[in-house]
Image (tube, rainbow, N blue to C red):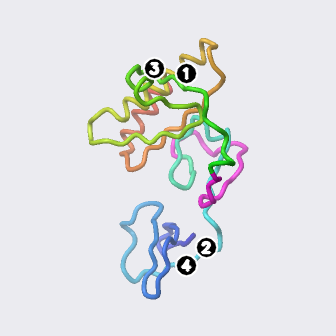
């Protein structure tokens, strides 16, 4: 991890003879050409575990939801080698999204990660939120074991994320 003179942190991704590529964690408005950048000596890690459930955090795992610091939690490195296909637990049990078109055409398994991509304003967020809410209903009926849903909003406006948090917390 590196830190700019302004206090903004980042991670060095590519090192070349004349250039260093850095992903900036935070606003880049305070960064200008010629700024001094120092390595922090730490490897990028983030909070993990059940303490994260129901929380809204930034890219470094710092809570931004106004509910204070995270309770007891573990930390995990950001860059780790993904387990091989043989080592992974098999996905064999279906997860009902509650959306018949998705369940029949593109079935999703419990434990599977699912990337939803598409053009703007085509209902990607609506599908994800409906699926999360449907899991809550199925669990409350006692028809399935606990299923944890994690929603990741990359590049979303804070106001949009706040609306999603409100929808999820009210239901």
Circle 1 residues within 10 Å: few <14, some 14–19, many ≥20: some
Point out the stretch of residues depicted in magenta. 64-84
Instruction: Give me the disc on residue 40.
Output: 2
* Residue at the image point whose x is 67% and y is 48% from the top: 86
Is 115 left or right of 122, judged from the image as shown?
right
**Nearer the viewer's eye, disc 1 or disc 4?**
1
Distance CA(mark 1)–CA(mark 4): 45 Å
Image coordinates for residue 171, horizontal then vertical, percent: 49, 20
Distance CA(mark 2)–CA(mark 4): 6 Å
* Residue at the image point whose x is 63% and y is 19% from the top: 144
Taking the view exactly as shown, the residue that stands out farthest to the front is: 86
Circle 2 residues within 10 Å: few <14, some 14–19, many ≥20: few
Instruction: Give me the disc on residue 136.
Output: 1
Circle 4 residues within 10 Å: few <14, some 14–19, many ≥20: few
User: Where is the N terminus found, in terms of image quarters?
Assistant: bottom right
Magenta-drawn stretch contains 70: yes
Q: Which residue is mark 4?
A: 38
Residue 26 lies in what quarter of the image? bottom left
Disc 4 or 3, which lies upstream in sequence? 4
Distance CA(mark 1)–CA(mark 2): 41 Å
Q: Which residue is mark 3?
A: 98
Distance CA(mark 2)–CA(mark 3): 46 Å
**Nearer the viewer's eye, disc 2 or disc 3?**
3
The secondary element bearing badge 2 is classed as loop
């Amino acid at each position: 991890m590196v830190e700019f003179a302004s206090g903004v942190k980042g991670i060095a991704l590519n090192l070349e003879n004349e250039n260093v590529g850095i992903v900036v964690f935070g606003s880049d408005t305070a960064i200008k050409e010629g700024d001094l950048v120092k390595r922090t000596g730490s490897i990028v890690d983030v909070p993990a575990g059940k303490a994260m459930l129901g929380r809204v955090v930034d890219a470094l795992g710092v809570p931004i939801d106004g509910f204070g610091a995270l309770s007891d939690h573990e930390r995990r490195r950001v860059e780790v080698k993904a387990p091989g296909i043989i080592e992974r637990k098999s996905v064999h049990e279906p997860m009902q999204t509650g959306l018949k078109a998705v369940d029949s055409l593109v079935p999703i398994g419990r434990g599977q990660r699912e990337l939803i991509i598409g053009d703007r304003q085509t209902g990607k967020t609506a599908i994800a939120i409906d699926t999360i809410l449907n899991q809550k209903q199925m669990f409350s009926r006692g028809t399935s074991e606990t299923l944890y849903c994690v929603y990741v909003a990359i590049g979303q406006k804070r106001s949009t994320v706040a609306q999603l948090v409100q929808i999820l917390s009210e239901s």
